[in-house]
Image (cartoon, rainbow, N blue to C red):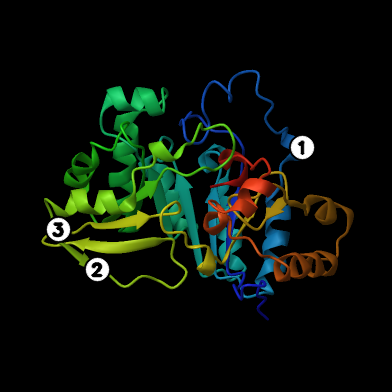
Amino acid sequence: MSINDRLKRPLEYLRISLTDRCNYRCSYCMPKDIFNTDYKYLKKSELLTFEEILSFIEVLNTFNLKKIRLTGGEPLLRRNIENLIVKIKDLGINQVALTTNGSLLSLDKAKLLKENGLDGVTISLDSLKCSTNKKINPYFNLSKVIDSIYIATDIFGFAKINVVIMNNINSNEIFDIVDRFKNLNVEIRFIEFMDVGETNEWNLDSVYSSERIYNDISKRYLLTKLKDELDSTSTKWQLEDYTAKVGFISSITQPFCRSCNRARLSADGFFYTCLFASHGYNVLETLRKSSSTLELQHDIQNIWSKRIDQYSVLRKTSRYENDRESKIEMSYIGG
């Protein structure tokens, strides 16, 4: 059976954070001034085990779950992730994907992930300049991340590249990135800088809109519109005469809340119904206190059927300003 929320949106897609830790410190996600040696990360005993994750997926599978994406933090920091992937596929999930910073995606690791059923990889890359990367992420290893993109396209045949564009930081490097990867079978996804969490010092002046990015690219390349999936977060375009596609994720200027079919599971077992959520629902407690999944199935059905989240639509309204609560950090909720 399927379940819909109050806005008629089905629960079809689950993003699972495998860890709240990351070896990078991107300013829009885990700024180093906050996420330093004093920061209290989750203890190993607090993390969902692979068996608990699989039990949760089994529950959601009763609601016609179609896709799972493994995230973090950095998901490749979680040991033996390939063992989890093969068991997820054994549950009948059609599509299992991974979002990574690319620093740990070696050729051998990519082959192992593919052999165990991983369907696709998304890699984060915000600049090709060392000077810019020092501003965005002081721990960035450019050569490793670029290598990982070529490895991903070689092993999986296709890869997505996530590029968060920030005004006056890397907004003048859009051509550089398109030029570098235009002949690869990739989708370069330009993402508006989003106000996820409370630590990334987001402000509207830092947003470089998708419209501006599109206009910049179209000055040099011909773009042909591609059909967008109904529940897609991005609008897609083909670079004419080249292999690569470009996409635009416009959470700030063109919210896609009305078609959002995504739920999120944190590394310590909290269920979230929105990327911009202020609170989640403790499912780890239920998983560990009972061998029966019926109670959890009932809880999820009850939570989702009452869901009304549409933060990005309401962001500018008086309702948002009056009711605003602290949002969960992206590194914890899994992006």
Task: Identify the mark at residue 242; answer none if there is no mark.
Answer: 3
Residue 259 shows in the view: yes
Image quarter (top left, top right, bottom left or bottom right) of the N terminus: bottom right
- Asked if marks 2 and 1 touch (Cβ < 8 Å), the reply is no
- Pick whichever of labels 2 and 1 is earlier in the sequence: 1
**Residue pointed to by mark 1:** 45
Which one is nearer the viewer's eye here, 202 or 62?
202
Give coordinates of residue 292: x percent, y percent: 85, 65
Q: Nearer the viewer, mark 2 or mark 3?
A: 2
- Pick whichever of labels 2 and 3 is earlier in the sequence: 2
Q: Report helix, strand or loop for mark 1.
A: helix
Q: CA distance from mark 2 to mark 3?
A: 14 Å
Give coordinates of residue 331: x percent, y percent: 57, 39
Label 2, residues with CA under 10 Å away: few <14, some 14-19, many ≥20? few
Q: CA distance from mark 1 to mark 3?
A: 48 Å
Q: Report helix, strand or loop for mark 2.
A: strand
**Residue pointed to by mark 2:** 225
Type of amino acid under label 1: Ser
Give coordinates of residue 147: x percent, y percent: 29, 38
